[in-house]
Amino acid sequence: MRRIGIDVGGTNTDAVLLDGDKVIFAVKRPTTLDVTSGILDALKALRADPAARGPVDSVVIGTTHFINAVVQRRHLMKVAAIRIGMPVSASLPPFCDWPKDLAERVHGETFMLEGGHDYDGRPIMPFDTAGMRTAARRIRDLGLRSVAVSSIFSPLDPSCEVAARDILREICPDVAVTMSHDLGRIGLLERENAALLNAMLHDLAVETVVAFRKAIAESGIDAPLFLTQNDGTVMQAETAIAFPVMSFASGATNSMRGAAHLSGREDVMVVDVGGTTSDIGQLRHGFPREANAVVEVGGVRTLFRMPDLLSIGLGGGSHVDAVSAKVGPLSVGYRLTEDAMVFGGTQLTATDIAVAAGLLDIGDRSRTTPIPKHLIVAALADAMRLLEENIDRMKTEAAAAPLVAVGGGAFLVPEQLAGVSEIIRVPFGDCANAVGAAIARVSGEADQVFRDLSRDDAIAAALQIAERKAITAGADPASLKTIEVEDMPIAYLPGNSLRVRVRVAGALDRTLAKREVA
Amino acid sequence: MSAAPLTEITPEDIESLAVGAWILGTGGGGSPYLGLLNLRRLYAQGHRVQLMSPLDLDDDDHVAVVSNMGAPLVGQERLADSRNIARAVEMQQEFGGFKFRAVMSVEIGGGNGTQALMAAAHLGIPVVDADCMGRAFPEAQMTSVAIGGLRPYPCTLYDPRGIEAIVTKVPSWKWMERTSRKICVEMGSIASTCKAPRTGREVKDWGIHFTTTAAIRIGGLVREANRLHTDPIAALLASEGGKRLFTGKVVDVARRTTEGFLRGSIAVEGIDADRGSRLDLSFQNEWIVAWREGDAVAMCPDLICVLETLSGHAVGTETVRYGQRVTVVALKAPAVLTSPRGLEFVGPRAFGYDLDFLSVFDERAGAGV
């Protein structure tokens, strides 16, 4: 399989071509304001290399485009929120815990209807279909084009959300509908928030995927497009249009997965040293550990599974204080090639220190001669201290662990660190994120409460649901592997209630990859 | 009724209360986040809640004791609606034929720490600066009023679909727990409840006093430290006379439910000063016993709080996860809980641990901590 992986970051757009497991070609280009011309530039450079010509099986893109839109409050639609579950939950309507500026920008109209379920599957109230039809007509009359529907305990019984969508389809067929149970988890406000975020990104998702496809076609590549998700797996472009929120945190995950692939190690620590920050994480079975519970996106509480990373202010562009020799957390960021001393600037950066110490050869080394030797030694020692302290914070065993160092600033990682058994450097480590995108697999997840089943039976039932979802998303059934199993008995519920969360992942099914083209 | 000085609870206090109540929840009681959202909305609508000292109650005053009963997970879906708890209080008034002077929470720890304020906002009566646990506990008989042998009935339960139930008489607090739990399950495993009304005298004699201000103070310290980027845990320990037990990473979490309770244990591997050693914590909804190399170094009813090392915010037994960086601290239990009769209700043996209670603040303790 020949696959192209592209990572569209805040500073750089990286592209790699993989043949099987091998990186054939890698290229880095600045990210452009319109995103797509950066991709075009990168793909043009890649296709110009003779080794990188020829057919490609798939293109996988990881992008921060959607999360940036939320954070920067740009390209967002007005949405209608439909909450099903009255009279329960009435005092906390949709948007109740949103930052005011964002709520004002995207709040179209709210409808609160009777319906929803209890934890044991009994309806809270019969679904108010008449009220739903009135709401749909009002949505049509207001000209709202995107709707988020959330119903109490919909992860256990989605029927109210499905019924609401069917009524919307009938009365206002052009409206895009996000159902909260598609985004997952127990926790009504957080699930509803995810649905609202998703709904407001609908137009941008359509435009972006169309632009990605156009960039790929213009580069003469005829292959299906996939986008990477928060958990390091891929979704088909069509799915990405329906669920843009699922790609929110893919950059950091891709980088760690890429590091695992390039090093051939599945259980290691990873440090990704960028221009401004270093992300430290731990891989288990080749996937990053997931962070705990609530994650805020642009000030909105959600339950997205994000990789558990420790981000510290250490990068190639970090300021170095000439008196204290402290490195970071301030950074010149993307202005490195203007502001750093080796590039003719006046700001002493970690890159200048590395060039002066002979760890790196870029820019004009002669410009580093005024840097006193003791400052070089002290600054490198400070970078080392930062890394050692924070690697220890992320480690979950007392024993020394291997560490893969990737990213454009990996030169700041010394040859030896306390608590690290070996430091692994890999070719193409500065494009680990694009490699991670290229190798991403297809996943499926289940998160449900099971009653009156033994633990083993409940896990088996959840596994079956997750596998079915993965296969529907394009995984080759034979290649499916369980990534994570978590079971949580639930306090104060009768009948041995057990909440089980299972995640499986597998290789992309080639026949399906072909199907997506047609 | 004598006039009593009242203190207005400010919007800032409410934010602090949510943080502090979660810490005093000692791992259980559910997050106060949804209660905080309700209070923010009530305050935005112009409601204000007044706080009164338990010492200012008249002996024959009626005081409502409220709690939200049920599974925290159900609360995450059905959310909390401030009007429900107010209705449970009204039911008591209708049943008893009297008016309440004030309202208090049965437990200050966790989500219930905000329930009294929600009821008070709707009913226009003050909140008493007291509760019946000084922390969180899993069962209705684990209260200072049960330790005091006070009457356990009547109890009202309310569901917003219009289901109203009253347990008018039971022979003991255990029976009240069993009977009301069954009703709660039928209501969807969540119910707004108003426990047996208390007199002003009873609250003065058996209430655990000044716990609302304690929660506000603790939460305020943590929030202030986060703003100033100073150490929230050091500030909390200095203010409350607490003890730091351990700092580390969660390396194992094991959970099971028996008889409806979430039981299990976590293991914390030391970092920084505790590198090379390990602390194990047993829980039953709340953190119950801390073990070091097989020795119990801290135990219930002393408050064992697991806090995020950097932020100082509480970590719950339902949400604790592998890899979290935590600091374990102990706070001193209210005296009524550590009395010989108190220990029968909430000592280690009440949770199935064959241990004689030894406070971590006792001079004879301290070995290994």
Image (cartoon, rainbow, N blue to C red):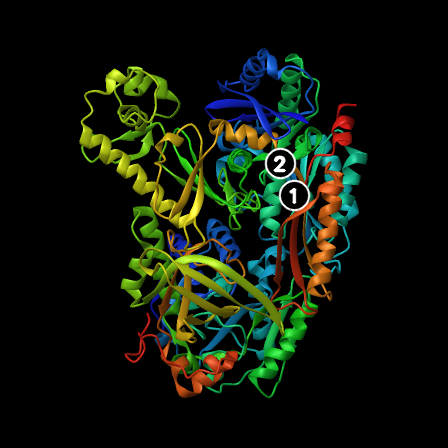
Q: Residue at the location (63% across, 57% down)?
A: B78
Q: Position of residue B9 (x, y in %)?
A: 39, 59
Q: Secondary structure at mark 1?
A: helix
Q: Amino acid at mark 1?
A: Leu
Residue A77 seen from this side: no
Classify residue A392 as left or right of residue A450.
left
Q: Which chain contains the residue that carries disc 2?
A: A
Q: Are marks 1 and 2 in contact (CB under 8 Å)?
A: yes
Are the residues flagged by discs 1 and 2 from a single subunit?
Answer: yes
Residue with the mark numbered 2: A198
Q: Quadrant of the C terminus of chain A?
A: top right
Residue A394: give x, y in percent of width and height. Answer: 43, 48
Quick one: quadrant of the N terminus of chain A?
top right
Image height of A189 relative to B181, above or below: above
| Residue A120, placed above or below residue B224 | below
Q: Residue at x 79, y 40 (%)?
A: A167
Q: Earlier in the sequence, mark 1 or mark 2?
A: 1
**Residue A448 visible (yes or no):** yes
Tell which tag, 1 or 2, sits nearer the viewer: 1
Q: For numbered disc 2, what is the local secondary structure?
A: helix
